[in-house]
Image (cartoon, helix red, strand yellow):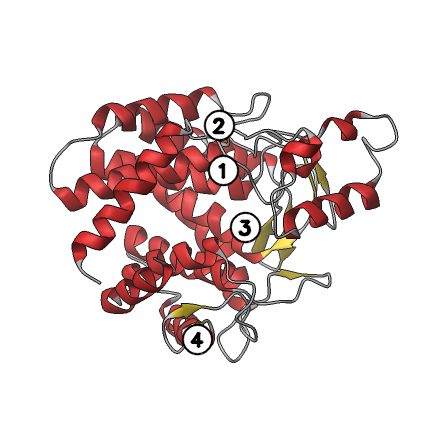
Amino acid sequence: MEPGDLRTALDRTERYIERERFRGYDPYDALTSPIFRMPVLRSARLPRFGFQQVIKRLPFQTRPLFGIGKGYNPVTLALVLQGYVYREVAAGERTRTERINHLVSELDRLASPGWSGRCWGYDFPWQSRYASYQAFHPTVVATGFVTNALFEAWSRSGVSRAGELVTGAVPFVRDDLNRTQEGETFCWSYSPTDRQVVLNATAKGARLCAQAHAISPDDELTRLARATLRFVADHQAADGGWPYSLGDDRQWRDNFHTAYILDCLDEYARLSGDDTFAANVEAGLDYYLSNFFEDGVIPRYYDRSLYPVDATACAQSILSLVRFGRVEQAAEVAAWCL
């Protein structure tokens, strides 16, 4: 693949996203259908979960038939913001400054009200196996995606408001999320209204603390990040992998959730100067590279299965491979994706 091919693909993708005004469907947006405003279906867990899975898995687009419109998701805006910043850095010129500032303003506007700090949720209601969430109900995952993009806008593009939003999110993570304690370590909950023990989610909370510390130094943030990452490290398997969660049947290992953990561990080390988890990163990266790429190129969804081929696994593979210095492999993955 020639570099021009990748630039052309990026340009086309960027134009498409902007033409759609950053709106689109999500795999889990089925419950925005008007039928789920009916009294019984509004709260019935099994029909909600089942319909969501059916819409997600159908090989053809049926959302318009059920009145499901394209959403305006803070996480989408955050990922586009991150992409804008990276493209500016790669080009070595400020060609997207106005668009970057616009998305920072939009993320500021879309923060979920009523919590201790700035926080974000998806723009649609959704039903998981273990919890039900209304639209814009904040989670550490959505908040982690948003603050990570804002941190890049602050650190690479100099957007001061983006940095303020990152530090403003700390009280949400520190004060609103529940904790599962193990000695001096702990795991933050997925949202303020559950007690799920999801490893990549708490790692995102740690990354947020490390990034906030980089903006406005506070040793307490480093201590919190280290304590919850110690929890994650303690639950790494001997082969280097991590289960999605603890205490329930979600014991699978998949591509992008593994990559999220590795990215967060690495970001913490880079920003704090603390190499406590270097051995965990090395073992986890070896596991990731050995188990999540078919022929070293095609991103596998699960460690034991190529399918389903998934856009998030493809995109996150490129980001993580570049982060860990495997640029040639990342280019091969990008070429395969195209």
Secondary element under disc 1, as helix, strand or loop, is helix
Q: Nearer the viewer, mark 2 or mark 1?
A: 1
Task: Between residue 52 and residue 183, name the one nearer to us.
Answer: 52
Cα–Cα gap, marks 4 and 1: 32 Å
Identity of the amino acid at label 3?
Ala
Q: Which residue is mark 4?
A: 294
Q: Is residue 285 above or below residue 71?
A: below
Tell me which label, 3 or 2, sits earlier in the chain: 2
Residue projecting furthest to the left: 92
Identity of the amino acid at label 2?
Arg
Q: Nearer the viewer, mark 4 or mark 2?
A: 4
Left or right: where 245 falls relative to 10 = right
Identity of the amino acid at label 4?
Glu
Residues packed near mark 3 inside 10 Å, few (<14), some (14 to 19) or many (20 plus): many
Tell me which label, 4 or 1, sits earlier in the chain: 1
Residue found at x 37% / y 75%:
296
Q: Is residue 210 above or below residue 255?
A: above
Q: For residue 118, which numbered disc appears in the image?
A: 2
Residues packed near mark 1 inside 10 Å, few (<14), some (14 to 19) or many (20 plus): many
Residue 136, by quadrant, is top right
Q: Which residue is mark 3?
A: 201
Q: Which residue is mark 1?
A: 143
Mark 4 vs 3: CB contact within 8 A? no
